[in-house]
Amino acid sequence: MAFKTGDEWRRQKELEEARKAGLAPAEVDENGKEINPHIPQYMTTAPWYLNSDKPTLKHQRNWNDKGNDESQWYDRGVKVFQATKWRKGACENCGAMTHKTKDCLERPRSKGAKWTNKNIAPDEKVEDIKLTGFESKRDRWNGYDAKEYARVVDRFEQLEEIRKETKKKEHLDEIHKMGLAIGEAEAAVDGAIDEDETKIKEEEEAGFGEVKKRVRTTAGGSTGSVRNLRIREDIAKYLLNLDVNSAYYDPKSRSMREDPQPDKPNSEKLFQGDNFVRNGGEYAAWQSLTLHSITAHEKGLDVHMQANPSLAEMLYSQFKEKKEQLESKSKEDVAAKYGSAAAPLPDEVKVLAGSERYVEYDRTGRVIKGVEVKAKSRYEEDVLINNHKAVWGSWWRDGVWGFACCHSTVKNSYCTGKAGEAAAQQVDEAMLANMEAAAKEREAAELKRRQESKLNDYQPAADTWGTDAPDKELDPKKVDAALRKLEERERAAMEGERSKRKYNSLEGGGGEMVTPEEMEAYRIKKGRGDDPMAAMLAGQAGAAGSGAGIGTGTTGYELL
């Protein structure tokens, strides 16, 4: 490599900058091909052992290129052999040997060539092309015939001619209305047609293509800048808020990171700060990935975003998949348990859906405007059976359903019309009369039974069965005998003896009646838990009774 002075290095640097900006022609290699000026220097510089004095990219190309695959492709539409009769193993539809029946591209025949032996299709040319080059394997335009585009060009030219003729006629009609001469009219029409509406006029594009050369820039060398690209109606960032304490504007980088209008609604803002743009794109996904790696590392997992980013991204993708599966499962469980409002409604529910028809009713519920549409259910409605003019259940009375046309309460009965309604009314009236007569008969029978009863002259002994003390004098000896008898009965019950008295033994002619003395003995022996003197009297009575041989209890005469 030859030695270069500082001026030569500076001129070389300026030349490279000019080539990158398009102000100088690109460098040419030994084959006459231009070298892209944006290729890095470490790629354009040839190794020292090649002894290359001229600029070249030969050292970057494949030296072991064995062949060219660009010219290899399938021959379209080439036929090999035309058979006259169907052959075994050929397509049953068209008769060609190069494909099977399921792969046939011809229209399916009603009777294939196998059975008719007519219109046998020729065999196609089958080629096995093996492309070895990297570009040829991925060339989407390989095998494309550029002549096919000529039809597109011809169609475009025909449409352009038709457009010009239509436009010429329109201009001629306008000029005839204006009353110009024929020569002036044709000249004006030709000038209008020559102008292309889609092209920008020269005075409009002036300024957009203006390139200004600048030398000795900050990075050194020369460069080019296209001017007048900003829309003049846009407000500069530093003019959005003139407060000196608002967002800082850097004039060198022309950046304003903070929002100059934080109190303004987002829908009315034209600019929300450069940080708003920086937080867009893939920043949110990167932030989530970093946060997941930090959280996993804190929980003991050996993962680090900077040390092993591939592992961190793989773990994060697995985490998202599991999370989505759990969320989808929970959604399915909730939808299975409570149903989904987003699911399509069944047909029976759609039938019951309301409509937007306007119906107006009066106070009594009658329709005065519009047509009333009654919602139908899944069951059959308005089905009239057995010559009825109303459906079953249209009439109800006394807890029974029936037909409104004849008031019949039997579902399988035939309609009798007004006569049936009158008969049903008569039956009701007769039934009511019969019920009233039966009630009167029962009342008369009850009255007669009471009048003829033997208990009419019976006067109950209130002094015997009353709860108060008796008013008349009782015999003390009989009372003592009744008390002893009652005590013997209680003692026998305590010792387990069974009474031989039968059920309802007091009834009948041979039964004994309760005497007033026995009732008095029962009152004396009856215990009263609410009496505060009961315990003391019971102790005294027990002491006295032990000597008398009567036992526990009291005669009751001590309290008199």
Image (spheres, grey):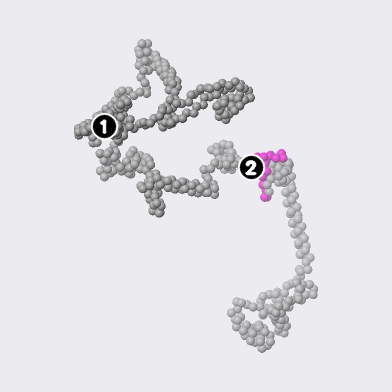
The residue closer to the viewer here, 511 or 492, is: 492
Please report the bounds of the magenta region as a residue range: 381-399
Q: In the image, what residue occupies the spot 65% across and 41% down?
A: 380
Residue 403, x across and y down, in percent: 69, 43
Residue 393, x across and y down, in percent: 66, 45
Q: Quadrant of the C terminus?
A: bottom right
Mark 1 nearby-residue class (10 Å; few <14, some 14–19, many ≥20): many
Question: For this view, does 380 lie left or right of residue 162?
Answer: right
- Residue designated by label 1: 17
Q: In the image, what residue occupies the spot 51% across and 26% down?
A: 126
- Residue 379, numbered circle: 2
The residue closer to the viewer here, 488 or 31, is: 31
Residue 265 visible in the current orientation = no
Q: Earlier in the sequence, mark 1 or mark 2?
A: 1
Element assignment for label 1: helix
Q: In the image, what residue occupies the spot 55% across and 27% down?
A: 98
Residue 118 visible in the current orientation = yes
